[in-house]
Amino acid sequence: MNVLVIGQGGREHSIVQKLALSSQVETIFAAPGNGGMTEAELVSISETDHDSLIAFVKEANIGWTIVGPEVPLLEGVVNSFREEGLNIFGPTKEAALIEGSKAYAKEVMAANGIPTGDHQVFSSMEEALRFIERAEFPIVIKANGLAAGKGVVIAQDQQEADQAIREMLGGERFGEAGETIVVEEFLEGDEFSLMAFVHGTNVYPLLPAQDYKRAFDDDQGPNTGGMGAYAPSENIPRSEVDRAVETILKPTAEALDQAGRPFTGILYAGCILTNEGAKVIEFNARFGDPETQVVLPLLENDLMQVIEDIADGRDPQLKWKQASCAGVVVASKGYPGPYEKGHPLPSMEENARTFSVYAGVKKDQDYLVSAGGRVLFVGAIGSGVDEAIEDVYRALHAAPNPNFFFRTDIARQRSTSFSSEYK
């Protein structure tokens, strides 16, 4: 069949790469895609132009459409496709609200006993400022809506909290996304990303992954959309992952179903393993980025078959390689602040075990140049995380380039290995 992937980032390229291995897929299209997606035919249609996407799907005889990013989901692209009787993998805008509103996500968790941090929701700047006068620090302040992975401030004292609240509720920093904020307790522990294929109340978990949000080594600098990742997450015991599936993913899917917002697609729980067990930091309604880039390469199943099985209510019987995958994001100098575009990409040392996933790039004549903050992802599969990440850094260090930067400690900060427990 022909398949369309909506989106243009690294997550979408990783999906395209996995679909390219499917025996069921003839041609892959990406809308709008990016110049590094050589496995797909690019379609110059915006990911939020529902009418044009639907017209293309009908014209090109597309069997399935897969939605990568969150914005088209929250704008109802799945609803629009379903109204036309077209196959599309992703949640409706009603179900995707679990990501689109942190306040709504907290409401769902509170009503259904899903473990998360204590919190308060504010739309009034004055009320929020009064609240933090008696708060214990550090404290976490989040813009309620979408903020490209950057709408979170961990305030160490009242001055930092005051500034974050004024910037968010004052409309200076995140626009509509910051018109409501969530202020919650700071949770300590090991973070992990747990994604699952979901259809109604059927939940099929993927391998847990760990990503690194801060821009610089030793988790310093501002929050980004993610600077690297590895899977399976070696600092989380299998028993705790299984418990998180039972106490977080399954109850959330059931709660959305009971609320008349049945979820189909990828439900992502950003979790933290505290002394009281795993708790939710955030929910996403789609594959994570860059977690997808290290989880999908370990999936042995045909991704297209998995999607069809899930849509038909069948257990996809997920199988995983007995290996680890790790990778590092190469970003434009200055990211997540202002940065220049149009720089030729660094040429890396050839390595049989490494692979590249492209994100913020475009074609300039016959070569790729930077066109975004997170430019590409260099990953590798190894028998363990150490082997995988050393292959990645060997390739990256062979091609220094002053126009780009990357963290040098991805996957090097972790505890006891549990990867052998994941079958």
Image (cartoon, rainbow, N blue to C red):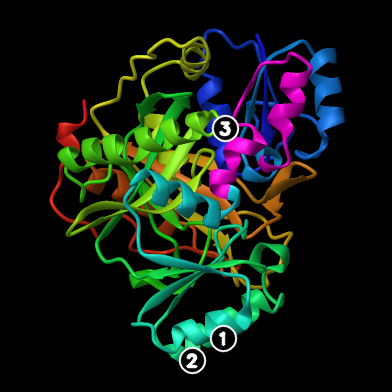
Q: Mark 3 belongs to which amino acid?
A: Arg
Residue 409 figure quarter: bottom left
Disc 2 packing (10 Å; few <14; some 14–19; many ≥20): few
Residue 151 figure quarter: bottom right
Q: Estimate the spatial distance between the alpha carbons at disc 3 and disc 2, rounded to whole Å.
A: 40 Å
Say whether marks 1 and 2 touch (CB < 8 Å).
yes
Of the 4 image quadrants, the one containing the C terminus is top left
Quick check: 316 above or below 370?
above
Q: Mark 2 belongs to which amino acid?
A: Gln
The residue labelled by disc 1 is 163
Disc sitting over residue 261 in the figure:
3
- Magenta region: 74-99
Q: Earlier in the sequence, mark 3 or mark 2?
A: 2
The residue labelled by disc 2 is 159
* x then y, percent, for residue 75: 73, 41
Q: Earlier in the sequence, mark 3 or mark 1?
A: 1
Magenta stretch containing residue 93, yes or no? yes
**Can see residue 109?**
yes
Magenta stretch containing residue 36, yes or no? no
Residue at x 71%, y 55% (from the top left corner): 371
Pick the front one: 173 or 254 = 254
Q: Mark 1 belongs to which amino acid?
A: Gln
